[in-house]
Image: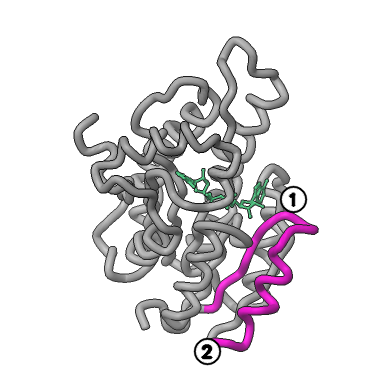
Amino acid sequence: MRMKGKNVIVTGGASGIGLASVERCLEEGASAVIADLEGGEGAARAAELDGRHAGRCLFKACDVTDTAQVDRLFAETVAELGSVDAVFNNAGIGGVTPSDEVSDDEYLRIIDINLNGVFRVARAALRVMYRQGSGSIVNCASILGMMGQSQTAAYTAAKGGVVNLTRTLGIEAAPKGVRVNAIGPGYIDTPLLQALDDELLQGLISLHPMARLGRPEEVANGFLFLASDEASFVTGTTLMVDGGFTAGKS
Ligand SMILES: NC(=O)c1ccc[n+]([C@@H]2O[C@H](COP(=O)([O-])OP(=O)(O)OC[C@H]3O[C@@H](n4cnc5c(N)ncnc54)[C@H](O)[C@@H]3O)[C@@H](O)[C@H]2O)c1
């Protein structure tokens, strides 16, 4: 029970890596808030999971591009659960478009969710965690935060930004008892990959030394480590969970 009695918010918690992380937190004794878009799968997933474990599982509608919704998420969670001990800043979208063809709308939307959203959520978390004198924030980066990839300008810019934002927040928050880290998944078998055609996907799989996609729960386990007290001397860093993808490239 590595998270016994802790309260965790997972943005993008309705699907894929986020949902697996919610499930692992509940299994490890935490209460978990699925923070995801209104009208998606979040409410149904929380209703299924609530009551199965010792901790609560709640759904809160939150679009990470909206500061007021993010701030309300934290205020309501503190009011209902009493604290926010860990946050998985996981909401994100993909996008593959040649850079000379990408529209302002597509470019700015990816940056607003995958980078600015991470900052909005981290800022709200810091305000609560500074008052508590403790907490752990885990931002979702990617292998594409460590290296470039053709036709993913907005995504790679955002994820590279998340890696360096994490360093800065890690330094800044350390004296106040709050840790900030990132996790860098390789290609993980989630709905995010559904947009990729099979040939491209097979090519990407072959780039992983482990020659397979990762599973959402393998990223969730990395999140759990960073969120838990087991990582008490870890801050400002990015833990790669990528089947060796970046090992030979950095
Ligand atoms: N799947 C991969 O191969 C992979 C690899 C590296 C990094 N990642 C990162 O992992 C994270 C999770 O991805 P996933 O593969 O589980 O994707 P997913 O599509 O299964 O889940 C993403 C979730 O984010 C939510 N979301 C999207 N926009 C949002 C917004 N504005 N506000 C709140 N929630 C929003 C979606 O509703 C969805 O539930 C993302 O940050 C992604 O960039 C994924």
Which image quadrant: the N terminus? bottom left
Residue occupying image coordinates x 80% and y 58%:
39
Find residue 54 and name its label.
2
Q: Secondary structure at mark 1?
A: helix
Q: Position of residue 240 (x, y in %)?
A: 31, 47
Residue 19 falls left or right of residue 62: left
Name the residue beneath numbered marker 1.
68
Residue 243 falls left or right of residue 214: left
Callout 2 crowding tier (Cα within 10 Å): few <14, some 14–19, many ≥20 = some
In this view, the mark in front (2 or 1): 2
Residue occupying image coordinates x 61% and y 77%:
57
79 is higher (above) or lower (below) than 90:
below
Q: Secondary structure at mark 2?
A: loop
Q: Nearer the viewer, residue 205 or 137?
A: 205
81 is higher (above) or lower (below) than 248:
below
Q: Nearer the viewer, residue 9 or 213?
A: 213
* Residue 116 visible, this angle: no
Residue 11 falls left or right of residue 226: right
Taking the view exactly as shown, the residue that stands out farthest to the front is 199
- Amino acid type, residue under disc 1 in the picture: Ala
Q: Earlier in the sequence, mark 2 or mark 1?
A: 2
Please say which color scheme the image uses: one colour
- Amino acid type, residue under disc 2 in the picture: Ala
* Residue 134 visible, this angle: yes
Asked if the stretch drawn in magenta spans residue 247, the answer is: no
Q: Position of residue 72 (x, y in %)?
A: 72, 60
Q: Nearer the viewer, residue 106 or 181?
A: 106
Magenta stretch in the rendered image: 31-54
14 is higher (above) or lower (below) than 168:
below
